[in-house]
Image: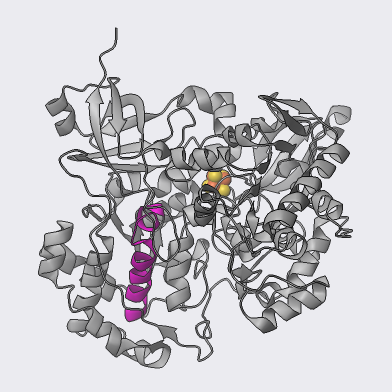
Amino acid sequence: SAMRQSRIRRTKTVCTYCGVGCSFEVWTKDRHILKIEPEHGPVNGISTCIKGKFGWDFVNSKDRLTHPLIREGESFREATWDEAFTYIADNLRRIRKTHGADAIGVISSSKCSNEESFLMQKLARAIIGTNNVDNCSRYCQAPATAGLFRTVGYGGDSGSVTDIAQADLVIIIGSNTTESHPVIATRIKRAHKLHGQKLIVADLRSHEMARRADLFIRPRPGTDLIWLSAITRYILDHDLAADSFLEQWVNNLDEFRESLEPFSLEFAEEKTGIPIQTLTKIAQMVAQSPRVAICWAMGVTQHSMGSDTSTAISNLLLVTGNYMRAGTGAYPLRGHNNVQGASDMGSMPNMLPGYQPVEDIEVRERFESAWGTTLPTTKGLDNHEMIHAILDGRLRAMYLCGEEMSLVDADANLVQKAFSQLDFMIVQDVFFSHTCQFANIVLPASPSLEKDGTFTNTERRIQRFYQVFEPLGESRPDWRIVQGIANELGAMWTYQHPSEIMAEAASLTPLLSGVSFERLEGYQSQQWPVAEDGSDQSILYENGFAFTDSKARLHPVSWNEPVDQPNDEYDLHLNNGNLLEHFHEGNLTYLVPGIREKTPDVFVEVSPELASKRGITNGTRVELTSRYGQVSVRALVTDRVQGNQLFMPMNSSDSPVNMLIGANTDPVTHTPAYKESSVRMRVLHEE
Ligand code: SF4
């Protein structure tokens, strides 16, 4: 009836899961979510995946945090917000007085809005007085950003998601796109099927995209840099490079060419296990395709050579002239919905918003005069360094927003040991996460459906989401909580709405100068860089690269053996990744009953050959031991993996794979080498 109809509300929102950034209408009645309807999403059109469509029930979960909680001995008691803010400010002041501002660390959330990330770094820098602020892109995509900064100048996808359809050849490296970025995978599948787009997949594991590919290669773990460099060398050696593009747009060709010396096809075959014939075929396919786009994800970045391998991808694109046009370019696929935005907004220890270095005096002065304060002058600790700083007594307090850091950081045992040594810890989240058990105070945050804001997706697209519900219980939007803490510490912030925060960010950040909530009304969106008149760029570098001379730079890289190699004691290689149904550590998706029933628990994939050698069948319980920890899980025998390679989904809070991962990192970004891990496996005999 009309009466009933009128009580149904439709509100535009943006998916809170992966970095594709699908947008849709949420149909609600009171606090019930009736359905999700994609309509005119600039990225997704009328598609969504299972998470975007059904992954929202957590909002009304009875497990939501609804009051601030203050620790008393081994348990927590409910507190008022006034009490919480006073308690926090007293403790932060005490620690700052005794140990200095740099004894405090702040972690922003890549699930929070751009405005919230902006405020977190402003709190750290302008109010607390430290550059110790970071976000979780350090755990996933920072190496991709580093590789692109070095070569082309911006740390973002060079084109748009919809443009990928125009590529003649798509190469996917270390990305289980179907399960991690479903709507992008759908677009590639369609172009492949309908427009004759060619697809090459490089991965350890045979997933759906691998099975669809025209060519699927399985280089040995940690050797992607080699085959990429070898085909780049082959292309240069055989006069297949884009000479006029190189001449007009690219610096450093001579030095780069010399650096490729070690990467002969013979060397590449020996190290990667890919036959010379196949490598030559890939080189020819790349050279002959007018438009090549390369997508990559954590199978590339979570390695000790993550930044250098990302650099090798960009080098190959430059040598073949595959930038500046639709259907070409670099597509690092971001994980969390706002992992791009958290970095864009300056939640990084070395960069103010818009990738403006904290060590640049002119940049700092601009922020200092806007904020009426002096800012710390040297770069702070990243999240990896913070853990070590706690262990050696330099870091005493942490404010952690929406980050399940005790489970998702590598070497989780060490991280948990560090957290238990903190003098003071604030954890802000929607649920009582695993990390909350280390906190002195837990603050209840509101998820995206309970607030306004913007997210920035993997292709630099800024989109608004609108409040659907009132915050549950006493929970509050993160930006309000950050403002409450700042004001208790003496700031006099008066933000009434996130649009005011974005206006401030835009006024201080050339990259975002024309961004405003008005221009982002409804389904409108803007892809940075956004000029003052509001014009944006769906393709980066159309008029040159982001360096003063407008030229890109080929950046030489070299190869080293992966750090954690299988040996006699730890004889198996352990890989990990996402499952379609779940998201990252699973703290939201496991609370959605329909999803939990489908994939209730974690498992380890074992190849048929290894299974028969060890007497393992489906469901056999096995114990995995690395140099760092131990977990026990059930085996799933599948030819998705081969030989002595194992695979575990990362989506589990019961037996997290990160208990097994060591402290090795990419030296450029300190991103953990999650994908380089050796373990041994023992069959557990059950009663
Ligand atoms: Fe959400 Fe990503 Fe699925 Fe789109 S593809 S609905 S953004 S999880």
- Please say whether residue 116 is visible from this viewpoint: no
Which quadrant of the figure contains the C terminus? top left
Rendering coords of residue 185 (x, y %) = 43, 51
* In magenta segment, residue 317: yes
Q: Nearer the viewer, residue 218 or 481?
A: 481
> Residue placed at 23% from the left, 26% from the top?
682
Q: Nearer the viewer, residue 435 or 239?
A: 435
Direction from residue 213 to residue 349 in the image, left or right: right
> Residue placed at 89% from the left, 58% from the top?
494
Direction from residue 453 to residue 131 in the image, left or right: left
> Residue placed at 17% from the left, 65% from the top?
279
In the rendered image, the residue lying farthest to the front is 98
Which quadrant of the figure contains the N terminus? top right
Q: Main secondary structure of the magenta part?
A: helix
Direction from residue 70 to residue 229 in the image, left or right: left
Q: From the viewer's perspective, is residue 33 above or below residue 234?
A: above
> Residue placed at 20% from the left, 23% from the top?
616
Rendering coords of residue 255 (x, y %) = 29, 87
* In magenta segment, residue 14: no
Q: Picture quarter containing residue 489? A: bottom right
Q: Picture quarter containing residue 52? A: top right
Rendering coords of residue 196 (x, y %) = 33, 61
Q: From the viewer's perspective, is residue 633 above or below residue 286?
A: above
- Please say whether residue 432 is visible from this viewpoint: yes
Please provide the residue range marked out in magenta.
298-320
Rendering coords of residue 625 (x, y %) = 29, 33
